Amino acid sequence: MQRKEASHPIPVALLAELTYRCPLQCPYCSNPLELAAYRQELETEHWLRVIDEAAALGILHIHFSGGEPTLRADLPVLVDAARKAGLYSNLITSATLFNRKKALALREAGLDSVQISFQADEPVLANHIAGTQAHAKKLEAAALTKELGWPLTVNVVVHRLNIDRFPEIIEFAHSLGAERLELAHTQYYGWALRNRAALLPSEEQLRRADAAVEDARARLGNTLQILHVIPDYYEKYPKPCMNGWGSTHLTVAPTGVVLPCPAAAAIKTLKFDNVRDHSLGWIWRDSPGFNAYRGESWMQSPCATCPRRTIDFGGCRCQAFLVTGDAAATDPVCHLSPQHNLIETWRGQANAPARVEPDPFEPRVATVRRQPAPVGDSGSR
Amino acid sequence: MSFGPEDVPSLAARTRLRHDAARDTDVLLYPEGVLVLNGSAGAILAECDGKRNVAEISAILSQHFGGIDVMADVIILLERLETKGLVVK
């Protein structure tokens, strides 16, 4: 029997960013700074084609995200198409617009699971971070999710302002009946990079947070699965970003641009293709953007000869570009990176004993009021 | 927890078992995760309908594999998935 060799990896997950519109203004938003450039959203028929092409490529999971995906009136139609294509569908929502009528339509369409973001466990801090009165509505949405029988993931983006409430946040997620809790520290791209000084926690805060997670795991066992992702600025080696460029994951942005990672639009030296012009299969297999950092031939020193290059793939291309200006550089988070001193400087600022709290942050807004700090700037204060 | 011959296993409600043509294998999908199953694992889980017990499932599988006793393998798989919350009894 002839064995068919796959010349390209088979992707596992598609992040469908239906819109970047969102009622919240979180200062760590992973959406691009140039929100206004994404108003020409794909039509329903584009998305239906993308869903069918994704299933044919071997994609198993589809995450409907944004922005706020429930702002799209065609969401139930897209969920229905995903279900018919065999994809496992997940709704990633801020949940402030998640009412019973919408929920019933999504259940009818066959939505498999729901992830609701919370900014904190208590309303004053949560609403401060979200920039709007969102917390009470999220509580209703979480109850509705459980009532309708969906598995619930609670996602809390962690940063300097909420990290000291880990015990309360874990108890909160448990009390909502969540099966999974993602305590995902801010990673510094987009809005979070701009607000880094206000968001990056201290080492002592991280240590206490980690202890709270260990304590909760011992207490709660299997009843609540806790995923704790620490900020990579505090790692010795970079994260194996996306399991390698163009290896398992596709993101389709609201305009139809297809990215190997949700943050990759920040890499201005690469051109990414659009599902309006090409099939998803061609973009995955053959487009220059997806092939730019596959394999190892693009690597520079010290990655090129590093024994860890098959473990972390040189780290994150987006972070390399944002910090060093070169997307093929070693991720500066790595202690072997020639530019690692920048990360150490920023970490030092987060741990400065004379630090005055709280730092102001800039909420995510559709109109950018000023230019972001230049690359490499440590941020004046 | 361990499974005995009389226990009736079923897949957790949040999972979905299906064949994947691109990988030519069965997969078990669940929130934020997937198990790519080898041939016999997929066949075992396909029989976990919430009605048959472990002994009955093992007997069905045994027929697929030329009459050899597979109950120990069935139990190992079920216990592994139970710790992940993907199988319940």
Image (cartoon, coloured by chain):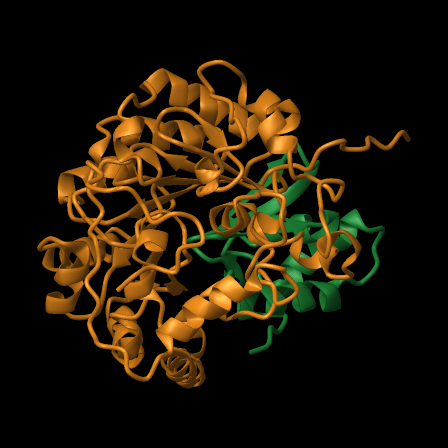
The letter of the orange chain is: A
Residue B21 is at least partly visible in this image: no
- Name which residue lies at 41% across and 24% down: A256
In this view of the protein, which residue sits in the foreground, A158 or A335? A335
Where is residue A252 drawn, in percent x and y? 44, 31
Where is residue A339 drawn, in percent x and y? 57, 59
* Left or right: A307, with A316 as reference point: right
Residue A1 is at least partly visible in this image: yes
In this view of the protein, which residue sits in the foreground, A31 or A151? A31
Q: Residue furthest top?
A: A277
- Name which residue lies at 24% across and 72% down: A172
Where is residue A297 drawn, in percent x and y? 76, 40
**Quadrant position of residue A188:** bottom left
Tag count in the figure? 0
Measured along the vertical axis of the image, is residue A235 above or below residue A187? below
In this view of the protein, which residue sits in the foreground, B63 or A174? A174
- Name which residue lies at 69% across and 63% down: B74
* Left or right: A70, with A275 as reference point: left
Measured along the vertical axis of the image, is residue A9 above or below residue A144? above
Measured along the vertical axis of the image, is residue B17 above or below residue A271? below
- Name which residue lies at 55% across and 62% down: A333
Instruction: Identify the colour of chain B in the image.
Output: green
**Quadrant position of residue B2:** bottom right
Quadrant of the rendering where the N terminus of chain B is positioned: bottom right
